[in-house]
Amino acid sequence: MNKTRLLLLIFLIMSVSFIAKGCSFLPRTSLIILQYHLEKSVSEEGDLTAEILGVALNDGSARLEYAEIEGSFYGYDGTLLARGFAKSISEEEGFFTLDPGEIWDFSISYSSDVRDAHPSVNILSWYLKKDSSGARIDGEAENNGDVMLSFAEITGTFYDSAATKLGSGTATITSLAVGEIWEYTIWYPARDPEDVDYVAYAKAEVTETDYASEPAQDVDHATVEVGRLRGSTLMP
């Protein structure tokens, strides 16, 4: 009886050690991109189009029930113009699976159909200043979205020491690239800034952003990376 217990204890210790070292009996979900390139061509309508063509491999041990690859299109100056996705789904059959070792020929088109744009501006700072030229808000903002902004507007509101709203002003910009820092100034709308108190606070918020679809001729290069994956819980 003691010998049986000892053998069970040894087996349990070995099992725990096996798992602790990173080993697992569960199938591994993985997808690698073997190659890709940016291809430009002229459509039947005479429009220039851009497309990412590539090959991916299910190098895991699990059958992939869903897989996606994210592609990013960049301009000649390195500006991120748009993002798109290739997903394991076909118009004829719906979602398809990728067995271990199976090859996937994927494509990502540069078009409004796959554009998943998130225009956004993050206000980094704002400071209230007052001198002989008047009162103003100076600050910095950043395009923290994923597309170039064709237009952005920030509204600043001026208050006195009693938190009474005195007036608002705006600052605008065009062609703000992804990651670019914008040094903005918002002037107090009244001629006399005496009512604006130094201890007053200034609110600044993005009130409007807009982006324009850049033509395919502006695309210079592209990158890809593996997105979401969902694998089978059972061995294929």
Image (cartoon, grey):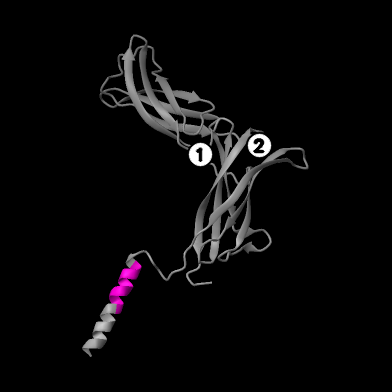
Q: Which mark is residue 178?
A: none
Q: Position of residue 85 (x, y in %)?
A: 57, 49
Identify the secondary structure beneath mark 2: helix
Residue at the farthest left position? 2
Categorize mark 1 by other alpha carbons within 10 Å: few (<14), some (14-19), many (20+). Answer: many
Kindly indicate whether the residue at mark 2 contacts the one at mark 1 (C-beta within 8 angstroms). Answer: no
Categorize mark 2 by other alpha carbons within 10 Å: few (<14), some (14-19), many (20+). Answer: some
Q: Is residue 178 above or below residue 168?
A: below
Q: Is residue 114 above or below residue 90?
A: above
Does the image show residue 144?
Answer: yes
Q: Position of residue 199 (x, y in %)?
A: 25, 23
| Image quadrant in which the C terminus is located | bottom right
Residue at the farthest top position? 132
Which stretch did the figure color magenta? Answer: 11-19
Identify the secondary structure beneath mark 1: loop
Residue 130 or residue 179, whichever sits in front: 179
Q: Which residue is mark 1?
A: 146
Quarter-of-image position of residue 42: top right
What residue type is disc 2 on? Ala
Q: Which residue is mark 2?
A: 216
Residue 96 or residue 102, whichever sits in front: 102
